[in-house]
Amino acid sequence: MVKIGTDINEAKSLLERNELVAIPTETVYGLAANGLRSEAVAKIFEAKNRPSFNPLILHVAYPGMIKELVKFVPEKARQLAEIFWPGPMTLILPKKAIVPDIVTAGLDSVGVRVPDHPLTLHLLRQLNFPLAAPSANPFGYVSPTTPEHVAKQLGDKVSYILDGGQCRVGIESTIIKVTDDAVKVLRLGGIALEEIEEITGKVEVDAKPTENPEAPGMLSSHYAPGKKIILGNIKENLAKYQGKKTGVLSFTQKPEGADEENLFILSASGDLMEAASHLFDFLRRLDQSDVEIILAELLPEEGLGRAINDRLRRAAH
Ligand code: TXA
Ligand code: MG
C-alpha cells in the first residue's frame, strides 16, 4: 500500500531524489516531480500513461518565482497573477531555456501556477525547484479530488501521497494564454470567465472540446468515466431508458422517478461552487456503482457552470 500522510519532509526528500509524490491543491490532486529534471518528469508521463505531446504545468510558491521560468510577463498577466494567485489559474507564458522540453512537449511556452493549498505551499517553499504536476489520474480519466482517489488509481506508481483532504474547488485551474496583444482562455476552470474579464476586458475562449486543440491535452474524450453518460433532461431520459439501471447526476433536485440509491445532487441550493467541488467525486461514485448508464444535466452557462458543463460534455463524449 502506498504511504499517505502529511509529512512534508518525506515528500521533500522523495522529490529531491527525483521520485513522484501526489500533492493536494485547491483544484485537484497533482502528480508531482522536480520540474527542472527531465528524468523525474519522464516518470510522470510513464505513471499516467500520458502521451508526451501533452505539456505539464509548473507549480511555484510565490508569483515572483515565475521570472526564473518565463522570458517575460505581459502587463495583463501580471495583473491576473496579482489578483488570482495563489489560486486556480494557470498562465501560459514564453518559456526560458531552463525549463526542460519534456515539460512543455517542445512548445516555446510553459504553464505556471501558484496553487492555493497550505500543505503544498509549505512544501514548495522548502524546495529549490518548481513542481511539474498534471492531475493525478490515469490519462483520460476524471481528476482526483481526495487522497483515496489517487491511491486507488495510481497507488502503485507513486512513492507518497501528501494528504491535504478533499480539494476545495474540485475542478482544474482556468488556463489563460497571455501575450502582449491578446488574452485567451484555453481551459475553463476554477476561476470564472466573468472574474477574468473584469480584469482584462473581453477575452477569447478557445476551450471547445476538440481533437486538434491549442491546449494539446484538451481532447474531447477527457474526463470520461467508463460508463455511458447521457446529457439532457433527466426526467425525459429516465422515461426513455426505463429498462436500464440508471444513475442520476442532477444539479439541484431529485428528478421524479429517480432511484434514490444512485442519485447524486450537486448542490441542493444551486450553488455553482459547491457543485464544482462535488462533480468529480460523484462521477467516480456513479462510475463505480452497478448502474448501466448515467443520466446528467447541464448547469446554467454562467460562472463555474461553464467549466462544469465543459467537463460534463467531455465526460459524455
Ligand atoms: O488545476 C490544475 O491545473 C491541476 C493541478 C494539479 O494544478 N493540473 C492540471 O494539469 O490540470 P493537467 O496536466 O491535467 O492539465 C494541464 C493542461 C493540459 O491540457 C495541457 O495541455 C495544458 O494544460 N498546457 C500545459 N502547458 C501548456 C502550454 N504551454 N500551452 C498550452 N497548453 C498547455
Ligand atoms: Mg488532467
Image (cartoon, rainbow, N blue to C red):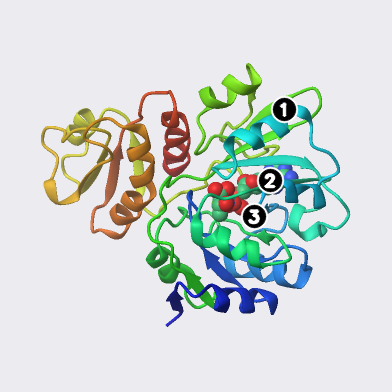
Q: Is residue 180 left or right of residue 42?
A: right
What residue is shown at x 49% (from left), y 39% (from top)? Answer: 190
Quadrant into which the N terminus falls: bottom left
What residue is shown at x 21% (from left), y 35% (from top)? Answer: 268
Mark 1 or mark 3: which is in front? 3
What residue is shown at x 61% (from left), y 72% (from top)? Answer: 20
Q: Amino acid at mark 1?
A: Lys
Q: Is residue 163 above or below residue 78?
A: below
Q: CA distance from mark 1 to mark 3?
A: 20 Å
Q: Is residue 207 left or right of residue 239?
A: right
Q: Disc 1 marks which residue? A: 76
- Across and down, in percent, residue 62 comes to 66, 50
Q: Quadrant of residue 16?
A: bottom right
Q: Amino acid at mark 3?
A: Ala
Which sits in the foreground, 97 or 120?
A: 120
Q: CA distance from mark 1 to mark 2?
A: 14 Å
Q: Which numbered disc flags the more N-terminal residue, 1 or 2?
A: 2
Q: Disc 3 marks which residue? A: 61
Q: Amino acid at mark 2?
A: Pro
Is disc 2 surrounded by few (<14), some (14 to 19) or many (20+) residues within 10 Å?
Answer: some
What residue is shown at x 43% (from left), y 67% (from top)? Answer: 163
Which sits in the foreground, 292 or 81?
A: 81
Residue 138 visible, this orientation? no
- Across and down, in percent, residue 313 comes to 45, 36
Q: Which label belongs to residue 306? A: none
Q: Disc 2 marks which residue? A: 63
Q: Secondary structure at mark 2?
A: helix
Q: Secondary structure at mark 1?
A: helix
